[in-house]
Amino acid sequence: MCYKTADINENLLESFQYPKGEFPVLRTKKSLDEYKQGEISCHWHSEFQFGLLLQGKLDYYIFNNPVSKLHHTLNPGDGFFINSRVLHGYRHTVPGSSLFLFSMIPSFFASPPFGKLYQKIILPVMHSKKNGLFLMSDQQEDTLMLRLFRKFKSLCPKEQDYELHAMEVICRIWQSLFHKFESGDLLADPSLKNISHMTRMHKMLDFIHENYSKPMTVEQIADAGHISKRECFRCFRAVINQSPIEYLIQYRLTMAANLLMSSDKPLSAISESCGFENISYFTKCFKKRYGILPREFRS
Protein backbone atom coordinates (compact mmCIF):
# COMPACT_ATOMS: atom_id res chain seq x y z
CA MET A 1 0.00 0.00 0.00
CA CYS A 2 1.22 3.51 -0.83
CA TYR A 3 0.88 5.69 2.26
CA LYS A 4 0.43 9.45 2.41
CA THR A 5 3.06 11.53 4.19
CA ALA A 6 2.61 14.84 5.98
CA ASP A 7 4.61 17.75 4.56
CA ILE A 8 7.07 17.91 7.48
CA ASN A 9 10.65 19.06 6.88
CA GLU A 10 13.90 18.29 8.73
CA ASN A 11 13.10 21.00 11.30
CA LEU A 12 9.77 19.25 12.04
CA LEU A 13 7.89 22.17 10.45
CA GLU A 14 4.66 21.20 8.73
CA SER A 15 3.88 23.46 5.78
CA PHE A 16 0.37 24.23 4.57
CA GLN A 17 -0.69 25.26 1.08
CA TYR A 18 -3.33 28.01 0.99
CA PRO A 19 -5.22 28.59 -2.28
CA LYS A 20 -4.43 32.12 -3.45
CA GLY A 21 -7.17 34.68 -3.05
CA GLU A 22 -9.37 32.41 -0.93
CA PHE A 23 -10.44 32.62 2.71
CA PRO A 24 -7.20 32.08 4.72
CA VAL A 25 -8.44 29.24 6.92
CA LEU A 26 -7.35 25.81 5.77
CA ARG A 27 -9.91 23.00 6.15
CA THR A 28 -8.65 19.41 6.11
CA LYS A 29 -10.17 16.00 6.72
CA LYS A 30 -7.64 13.28 7.54
CA SER A 31 -8.21 9.55 7.46
CA LEU A 32 -5.36 8.09 9.48
CA ASP A 33 -5.59 4.72 7.72
CA GLU A 34 -3.92 6.52 4.79
CA TYR A 35 -0.78 7.21 6.86
CA LYS A 36 1.83 4.65 7.87
CA GLN A 37 0.91 3.12 11.24
CA GLY A 38 -1.95 5.62 11.37
CA GLU A 39 0.41 8.27 12.70
CA ILE A 40 1.24 11.91 12.12
CA SER A 41 4.66 12.20 13.72
CA CYS A 42 5.90 14.99 15.97
CA HIS A 43 5.79 18.37 14.20
CA TRP A 44 4.91 22.05 14.61
CA HIS A 45 3.48 24.86 12.52
CA SER A 46 3.06 28.61 12.82
CA GLU A 47 -0.70 28.28 12.50
CA PHE A 48 -3.23 27.91 15.29
CA GLN A 49 -4.98 24.60 14.75
CA PHE A 50 -8.35 23.28 15.87
CA GLY A 51 -9.47 19.69 15.47
CA LEU A 52 -12.49 17.44 15.92
CA LEU A 53 -12.29 13.64 16.03
CA LEU A 54 -15.01 12.28 13.74
CA GLN A 55 -14.58 8.56 14.33
CA GLY A 56 -12.17 6.06 15.86
CA LYS A 57 -9.76 6.81 18.69
CA LEU A 58 -6.56 8.88 18.88
CA ASP A 59 -3.53 9.03 21.14
CA TYR A 60 -2.64 12.73 21.03
CA TYR A 61 0.40 14.35 22.62
CA ILE A 62 1.52 17.95 23.06
CA PHE A 63 5.07 18.79 24.13
CA ASN A 64 5.35 21.28 27.00
CA ASN A 65 9.13 21.28 26.52
CA PRO A 66 11.64 18.99 24.74
CA VAL A 67 11.43 16.30 27.45
CA SER A 68 7.89 16.66 28.80
CA LYS A 69 4.63 16.04 26.99
CA LEU A 70 0.92 16.13 27.72
CA HIS A 71 -0.88 13.01 26.50
CA HIS A 72 -4.58 12.33 26.05
CA THR A 73 -6.81 9.74 24.40
CA LEU A 74 -9.51 11.28 22.20
CA ASN A 75 -12.85 9.65 21.38
CA PRO A 76 -15.37 10.61 18.68
CA GLY A 77 -16.76 14.08 19.34
CA ASP A 78 -13.70 15.21 21.31
CA GLY A 79 -11.58 18.09 20.04
CA PHE A 80 -8.41 20.06 20.61
CA PHE A 81 -6.65 23.39 20.14
CA ILE A 82 -2.93 23.58 19.30
CA ASN A 83 -1.15 26.86 19.85
CA SER A 84 1.22 28.41 17.32
CA ARG A 85 4.71 26.83 17.08
CA VAL A 86 3.98 23.95 19.49
CA LEU A 87 5.38 20.44 18.98
CA HIS A 88 2.63 17.81 18.81
CA GLY A 89 1.66 14.56 17.13
CA TYR A 90 -0.94 11.82 17.14
CA ARG A 91 -1.74 8.27 16.02
CA HIS A 92 -4.86 6.18 15.84
CA THR A 93 -5.41 3.25 18.19
CA VAL A 94 -8.23 1.71 16.15
CA PRO A 95 -8.59 1.48 12.35
CA GLY A 96 -10.92 3.86 10.58
CA SER A 97 -10.02 6.91 12.67
CA SER A 98 -10.59 10.27 10.99
CA LEU A 99 -10.55 13.89 12.07
CA PHE A 100 -11.48 17.33 10.81
CA LEU A 101 -8.85 20.08 11.13
CA PHE A 102 -8.94 23.79 10.48
CA SER A 103 -5.86 25.97 10.71
CA MET A 104 -5.24 29.72 10.57
CA ILE A 105 -2.17 31.90 10.76
CA PRO A 106 -1.90 34.26 13.77
CA SER A 107 -1.99 37.26 11.44
CA PHE A 108 -5.58 36.36 10.51
CA PHE A 109 -6.58 39.06 13.01
CA ALA A 110 -3.47 41.22 12.61
CA SER A 111 -4.41 43.50 9.75
CA PRO A 112 -6.89 46.40 9.90
CA PRO A 113 -9.57 46.58 11.12
CA PHE A 114 -8.59 43.85 13.58
CA GLY A 115 -5.41 45.45 14.99
CA LYS A 116 -6.80 45.91 18.50
CA LEU A 117 -8.21 42.39 18.52
CA TYR A 118 -4.77 41.04 17.68
CA GLN A 119 -3.24 42.84 20.65
CA LYS A 120 -6.03 42.15 23.12
CA ILE A 121 -7.07 38.56 22.44
CA ILE A 122 -4.65 36.89 19.99
CA LEU A 123 -1.23 37.72 21.44
CA PRO A 124 -2.21 36.81 25.04
CA VAL A 125 -3.25 33.34 23.86
CA MET A 126 -0.33 32.86 21.47
CA HIS A 127 2.19 33.66 24.23
CA SER A 128 0.21 32.00 27.00
CA LYS A 129 1.23 29.42 29.58
CA LYS A 130 -0.70 26.76 27.66
CA ASN A 131 0.52 24.97 24.53
CA GLY A 132 -2.87 23.50 23.75
CA LEU A 133 -6.21 22.29 25.06
CA PHE A 134 -8.11 19.03 24.88
CA LEU A 135 -11.88 19.39 24.65
CA MET A 136 -13.95 16.48 25.93
CA SER A 137 -17.44 15.81 24.62
CA ASP A 138 -18.57 14.59 28.06
CA GLN A 139 -17.47 17.80 29.81
CA GLN A 140 -20.11 20.52 30.11
CA GLU A 141 -17.55 23.35 29.93
CA ASP A 142 -16.34 22.13 26.52
CA THR A 143 -19.79 21.80 24.94
CA LEU A 144 -19.92 25.27 23.36
CA MET A 145 -16.55 25.10 21.62
CA LEU A 146 -17.19 21.61 20.28
CA ARG A 147 -20.59 22.70 18.97
CA LEU A 148 -18.89 25.60 17.17
CA PHE A 149 -16.28 23.22 15.72
CA ARG A 150 -19.11 21.10 14.30
CA LYS A 151 -20.82 24.19 12.93
CA PHE A 152 -17.64 25.30 11.16
CA LYS A 153 -17.24 21.80 9.70
CA SER A 154 -20.81 21.94 8.36
CA LEU A 155 -20.18 25.14 6.39
CA CYS A 156 -19.84 24.70 2.63
CA PRO A 157 -16.93 26.69 1.08
CA LYS A 158 -18.80 26.78 -2.24
CA GLU A 159 -21.69 28.79 -0.80
CA GLN A 160 -21.82 32.45 -1.83
CA ASP A 161 -21.78 33.70 1.77
CA TYR A 162 -19.33 31.10 3.14
CA GLU A 163 -16.75 33.69 4.20
CA LEU A 164 -19.30 35.66 6.23
CA HIS A 165 -20.52 32.59 8.09
CA ALA A 166 -16.95 31.33 8.56
CA MET A 167 -15.85 34.67 10.06
CA GLU A 168 -18.81 34.62 12.43
CA VAL A 169 -18.05 31.10 13.68
CA ILE A 170 -14.29 31.69 13.97
CA CYS A 171 -14.87 34.85 16.02
CA ARG A 172 -17.18 32.92 18.34
CA ILE A 173 -14.65 30.09 18.64
CA TRP A 174 -11.88 32.51 19.52
CA GLN A 175 -14.08 34.33 22.01
CA SER A 176 -14.84 31.04 23.73
CA LEU A 177 -11.17 30.02 23.65
CA PHE A 178 -10.05 33.36 25.08
CA HIS A 179 -12.54 33.12 27.94
CA LYS A 180 -11.38 29.58 28.68
CA PHE A 181 -7.76 30.76 28.87
CA GLU A 182 -8.77 33.82 30.90
CA SER A 183 -10.85 31.90 33.44
CA GLY A 184 -8.05 29.38 33.89
CA ASP A 185 -5.46 32.16 34.43
CA LEU A 186 -3.58 30.87 31.39
CA LEU A 187 -3.07 34.14 29.52
CA ALA A 188 0.42 35.38 28.78
CA ASP A 189 0.66 37.83 31.63
CA PRO A 190 -1.49 38.87 34.61
CA SER A 191 -0.62 42.49 33.86
CA LEU A 192 -3.07 42.29 30.96
CA LYS A 193 -5.56 43.29 33.64
CA ASN A 194 -3.52 46.38 34.43
CA ILE A 195 -5.08 49.03 32.18
CA SER A 196 -2.30 51.62 32.37
CA HIS A 197 0.36 49.00 31.66
CA MET A 198 -1.50 47.63 28.65
CA THR A 199 -2.29 51.12 27.37
CA ARG A 200 1.44 51.67 26.92
CA MET A 201 1.80 48.30 25.22
CA HIS A 202 -1.11 49.05 22.89
CA LYS A 203 0.48 52.34 21.86
CA MET A 204 3.80 50.67 21.12
CA LEU A 205 2.20 47.79 19.24
CA ASP A 206 0.07 50.25 17.27
CA PHE A 207 3.24 52.11 16.33
CA ILE A 208 4.86 48.88 15.10
CA HIS A 209 1.76 47.76 13.18
CA GLU A 210 1.40 51.13 11.48
CA ASN A 211 5.08 51.65 10.67
CA TYR A 212 6.61 48.17 10.29
CA SER A 213 7.47 48.90 6.65
CA LYS A 214 9.84 51.71 7.71
CA PRO A 215 13.22 51.63 9.49
CA MET A 216 12.58 51.47 13.25
CA THR A 217 14.56 51.60 16.50
CA VAL A 218 13.75 50.61 20.07
CA GLU A 219 13.95 54.30 21.01
CA GLN A 220 11.15 55.10 18.55
CA ILE A 221 9.01 52.24 19.88
CA ALA A 222 9.59 53.42 23.48
CA ASP A 223 8.72 57.00 22.52
CA ALA A 224 5.38 55.78 21.15
CA GLY A 225 4.56 54.45 24.62
CA HIS A 226 6.01 57.53 26.37
CA ILE A 227 8.40 55.37 28.37
CA SER A 228 12.15 54.81 28.59
CA LYS A 229 14.02 52.33 26.43
CA ARG A 230 14.65 50.17 29.51
CA GLU A 231 10.96 50.16 30.46
CA CYS A 232 10.08 49.33 26.86
CA PHE A 233 12.20 46.17 27.04
CA ARG A 234 10.62 45.26 30.38
CA CYS A 235 7.06 45.71 29.08
CA PHE A 236 7.64 43.55 26.02
CA ARG A 237 9.27 40.79 28.07
CA ALA A 238 6.48 40.86 30.66
CA VAL A 239 3.59 40.75 28.19
CA ILE A 240 4.76 38.74 25.17
CA ASN A 241 8.15 37.37 26.29
CA GLN A 242 10.00 38.96 23.38
CA SER A 243 12.20 42.00 22.89
CA PRO A 244 10.72 44.91 20.89
CA ILE A 245 12.93 44.10 17.89
CA GLU A 246 12.11 40.39 18.07
CA TYR A 247 8.42 41.26 17.94
CA LEU A 248 8.98 43.75 15.10
CA ILE A 249 10.79 41.14 13.00
CA GLN A 250 8.13 38.53 13.77
CA TYR A 251 5.37 40.93 12.72
CA ARG A 252 7.22 41.83 9.52
CA LEU A 253 7.62 38.13 8.72
CA THR A 254 3.94 37.50 9.43
CA MET A 255 2.91 40.24 7.02
CA ALA A 256 5.41 38.94 4.46
CA ALA A 257 3.93 35.44 4.76
CA ASN A 258 0.50 36.97 4.14
CA LEU A 259 1.74 38.61 0.95
CA LEU A 260 3.46 35.44 -0.22
CA MET A 261 0.15 33.59 0.04
CA SER A 262 -2.15 36.29 -1.30
CA SER A 263 -0.16 38.05 -4.02
CA ASP A 264 2.21 37.50 -6.93
CA LYS A 265 4.55 40.31 -5.90
CA PRO A 266 8.26 39.52 -6.41
CA LEU A 267 10.23 38.62 -3.28
CA SER A 268 12.24 41.84 -3.50
CA ALA A 269 9.06 43.94 -3.40
CA ILE A 270 7.64 41.96 -0.47
CA SER A 271 10.93 42.25 1.41
CA GLU A 272 11.03 46.02 0.94
CA SER A 273 7.34 46.60 1.72
CA CYS A 274 7.70 44.67 4.99
CA GLY A 275 10.64 46.72 6.22
CA PHE A 276 13.63 44.48 5.53
CA GLU A 277 16.76 46.33 4.47
CA ASN A 278 17.65 43.77 1.80
CA ILE A 279 16.33 40.52 0.39
CA SER A 280 19.18 38.39 1.76
CA TYR A 281 18.41 39.47 5.34
CA PHE A 282 14.70 38.88 4.72
CA THR A 283 15.43 35.38 3.41
CA LYS A 284 17.67 34.60 6.39
CA CYS A 285 15.04 35.74 8.91
CA PHE A 286 12.23 33.94 7.08
CA LYS A 287 14.18 30.65 6.96
CA LYS A 288 15.02 30.94 10.66
CA ARG A 289 11.38 31.44 11.66
CA TYR A 290 9.52 29.16 9.24
CA GLY A 291 12.18 26.58 8.42
CA ILE A 292 11.87 27.09 4.66
CA LEU A 293 12.78 29.76 2.12
CA PRO A 294 10.18 32.36 1.05
CA ARG A 295 9.99 30.92 -2.48
CA GLU A 296 9.39 27.44 -1.01
CA PHE A 297 6.68 28.85 1.27
CA ARG A 298 4.93 30.33 -1.76
CA SER A 299 5.19 27.26 -4.01
Image: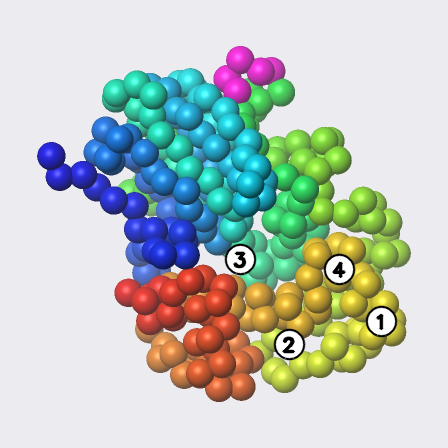
In which quadrant of the rendered view does residue 269 lie?
Answer: bottom left
The disc placed on residue 211 is 2
In the figure, is residue 110 to the left or right of 280? right
Task: Name the main secondary structure of what is drawn in magenta.
Answer: loop
In which quadrant of the rendered view does residue 240 lie?
Answer: bottom right
The residue to which callout 4 is attached is 237
The residue to which callout 1 is attached is 230
The image shows residue 99, relative to residue 289, as above or below, that is: above
- Give me the residue at 11% from left, 34% from top: 1
Q: Amino acid at mark 4?
A: Arg
Which residue ends up furthest to the top in the rendered image?
A: 138
Determine the CA span between mark 1 and mark 4: 11 Å
Q: Nearer the viewer, mark 2 or mark 1?
A: 1
Viewer-nearest residue: 142 or 164 = 142
Determine the CA span between mark 3 and mark 1: 28 Å
Circle 3: element type: helix
Circle 4: element type: helix
The disc placed on residue 136 is none
Determine the CA span between mark 2 and mark 4: 21 Å
Which residue ends up furthest to the left in the rendered image?
A: 1
Question: In the image, residue 28 lies at what x, y percent?
Answer: 33, 40
